[in-house]
Amino acid sequence: MYPFLRLTKTIVKSSLGLKQGKALSLTDTSEYHFTANVNDIDNFLEMNNGRILTLFDLGRTDFAIRSGLGVKLIKNRWGLVVAGSTIQYRKRIRAFDKVTMKTRICAIDERWFYVEQTMWVKGKCTCHALLRTAVTDFKSGKALPTKEILDSLGHSDINLPPDEWVQAWIQADQLRPYPDI
């Protein structure tokens, strides 16, 4: 089940943080802290891989609110979409572990914002995700050009070309055939 209570808590906490001077620039890294709950744990007594991806939503929500994008989403009737992702799992997250999630925009092109997210327990990275995301128009459902989003946020000058590893993922993903069955 989607963690709606955690989502609500995230929205409130991030909004209060924004009012308390904890705003972020689009080039900053947000940190989101939580404790792994029993309902996050699978039959192998570790956080379920699907739950990790779901909880990364909360980190992106925190980042969007604190960077000012959240207000623009509501005002302009925009939405957020994930169009692709890759993730590596390295260490287990167990029940009641204190987790720090880090979220940052690591690259921007004409259409996509590439978001890098990690989770950390006791100073060690447990997993690392790269996501291709976009801001969409609610009516059309189409991705808006990143320039339009950057302009609306007053960040027209931001230039974040992809690092070599991000570019390699972009190119590899373009080679991937989409199934037609």
Image (cartoon, rainbow, N blue to C red):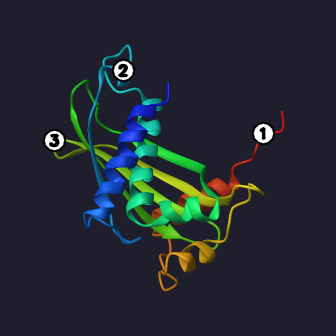
Asked whether 145 or 42 is in front, the reply is: 145
Decide which of tag 3 and tag 2 comes sooner along the chain. Answer: 2
**Looking at the image, which residue is at 56% across and 56% down?**
132
Q: Looking at numbered disc 2 in the image, what kind of residue is underneath it?
A: Asn
The quadrant where residue 52 appears = top left
Q: Looking at numbered disc 1 in the image, what kind of residue is underneath it?
A: Pro
List x then y, in percent, for residue 135: 61, 61
Residue furthest out toward the bottom: 157
Q: Residues within 10 Å of mark 1 (few under 14, many from 20)?
A: few
Q: Above or below — where is 7 with respect to 151?
A: above
Q: Residues within 10 Å of mark 3 (few under 14, many from 20)?
A: few
The quadrant where residue 97 appears = top left
List x then y, in percent, for residue 46: 32, 23
Q: Cα distance, mark 1 to mark 3?
A: 41 Å
The image's mark for residue 39 is 2
**Looking at the image, which residue is at 41% across and 66% down?**
67
Q: Are marks 1 and 3 in contact (CB under 8 Å)?
A: no
Q: Horizontal placement of 89 versus 143: left or right?
A: left
Residue 92 makes an appearance in the image: yes
Q: Horizontal placement of 27 versus 21: left or right?
A: right
Q: Which residue is mark 3?
A: 122
List x then y, in percent, for residue 174: 68, 57
Image quarter (top left, top right, bottom left or bottom right) of the C terminus: top right
Asked whether 44 or 32 is in front, the reply is: 32
Q: Which residue is mark 1?
A: 179
Of badges 1 and 3, the one in the foreground is 3
